[in-house]
Image (cartoon, rainbow, N blue to C red):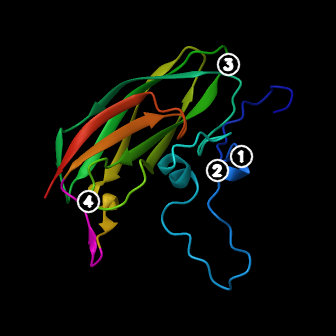
Amino acid sequence: MLFGDVNPSGHLPVSFPASEADLPPFDNVSLKVDYGYLHGYRHLDHEKKSPLFPFGHGLSYTRYEYTNLRIDEDTVAAAGTLRATCDVQNTGARAGRATVQLYIGAPDSLTLRAPRDLRGFAQVELAAGEKKSVTIEVPVASLAIWDGSAMTVQATSYRVEVGASAGDLPLVAQVMVAP
């Protein structure tokens, strides 16, 4: 990889904050600490902090362009499956593997939620200049959140974002979830 014989395709499973001040308070005295739902990239997004390296960030010897996001249905049943398709093109001079990441948020949620959660990803091998369509399926049940008494899929509008990392999401669409 160092000499460019192989194109790296790994991605970070964490976010690197730009500053220690961007981290939540740290308690190194208590025997038990509960940091809750908003941690990692969710915490940084919620606090509107730009990370040094976002969740899902990866390096490559080539470049990818994400275009033409299509959602199969404008409204999906709570028991259904959301299908999102986009085109990915290798715009560089080398072959590589793109990791397409799909994040979903519920801006009108009645419950505290992060602005976006990773809900699916797919990898695609692309020769230099090649373009392919990639489909990611997300069970709507995976959008459930604890409402205080049960895990519930809220009937509301959801924001679907697709791209290379939590910090690089050029494609955006809306989908409604029906009860």
Instruction: Residue 107 in the image: state x and y as whole percent.
Output: 31, 47
The Cα–Cα distance between marks 4 and 3, rounded to whole angstroms, is: 46 Å
Query: Which residue range is magenta in the image?
Result: 148-155
Gap between marks 3 and 1 measured at Cα? 34 Å
Task: Kindly indicate whether the residue at mark 2 contacts the one at mark 1 (C-beta within 8 angstroms).
Answer: yes
Q: Which of marks 2 and 4 is nearer the N terminus?
A: 2
- Between disc 3 and disc 1, whose residue precedes? 1
Residue 154 lies in magenta, yes or no?
yes
- Estimate how packed mark 1 is, as few (under 14), some (14 to 19) or many (20 or more) residues with alpha carbons within 10 Å: few
Which residue in the rendered view is the most extreme toward the right? Answer: 3
Q: Of the residues shown, which amino acid type is indicated by label 2?
A: Asp
Residue sitting at x 64%, y 23%: 95
- Can you tell which mark lies on residue 94? 3
Please state which of residues 127 and 93 is positioned toward the viewer in this rendering: 93
- What's the mark number on residue 22? 2
Mark linked to residue 165: none
Secondary element at image label 4 = loop
Q: Which of marks 4 and 3 is nearer the N terminus?
A: 3
Dominant secondary-structure state across the stretch colored magenta: loop
Q: Compute the Cα span from label 1 to label 4.
A: 31 Å
Badge 3: residue crowd in 10 Å (few <14, some 14–19, many ≥20): some
64 lies left or right of 2:
left
Residue beneath label 4, please?
A: 110
Where the C terminus falls, by quadrant? bottom left
Q: Where the N terminus falls, by quadrant?
A: top right
Give the left or right position of residue 139, taking residue 130 as reference. left
Q: How far apart are marks 2 and 3 (CA)?
A: 36 Å
Q: Where is residue 70 in the image (x, y as percent from the top left)?
A: 29, 30
Q: What element carries label 2?
A: helix
Observer-nearest of 86 and 5: 86
Instruction: Name which residue type carries label 3.
Output: Arg
Q: Please tell me the numbered disc located at residue 19.
A: 1
